[in-house]
Amino acid sequence: MDKGILFISATILLSLGITGSGFFIGNGYYQTHMNNRSVIVKGLAEMPVKADLAIWNIKFQTIGNELTETQSKINNHKDLIIAFLNKNGFRSSEITIG
């Protein structure tokens, strides 16, 4: 058999192996991270449970040259977000600022 054909065959097999392994690693990573948002608990009985806690991270940023001006903008944005949440049914006791 010609050395050139042997080299090309080995190169094709190696590239297919690398491509296949990359696919399986990426697919495993995707499946793992897409399914981590739920909890399944099984025991002697099963029953649906309504969730009563949700955590929404709402981030905002402000840019300014003066600290007092920037802090004022941040406080205004925070007040607007809290007013929006209150208007849509959230109580102030349910909102945590961090």
Image: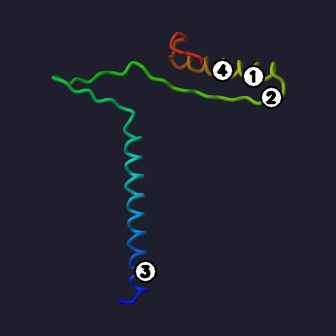
Quick one: label 2 or label 1, which is nearer the N terminus?
A: 2
Mark 2 to mark 3: distance in Å?
60 Å
Quick one: label 4 or label 1, which is nearer the N terminus?
A: 1
Q: Residue at x 41, y 46 (%)?
A: 29
Labels 2, 3: front one: 3
Q: Quadrant of the C terminus?
A: top right
The residue identified by callout 3 is 8
Quick one: label 4 or label 2, which is nearer the N terminus?
A: 2
Q: Residue at x 40, y 70 (%)?
A: 14
Quick one: label 2 or label 3, which is nearer the N terminus?
A: 3
Residue situated in front as seen by the camera: 52 or 83 = 52
Say if mark 2 contacts mark 1, CB within 8 Å.
yes
The residue identified by callout 2 is 64
User: Of the residues shown, which amino acid type is indicated by label 3?
Assistant: Ile
Name the image quarter holding residue 3: bottom left
User: Of the residues shown, which amino acid type is indicated by label 2?
Assistant: Gly
Whole-percent x, y for residue 43 in the image: 19, 24
Residue situated in front as seen by the camera: 8 or 81 = 8
Query: Which numbered circle lies on residue 73?
Result: 1
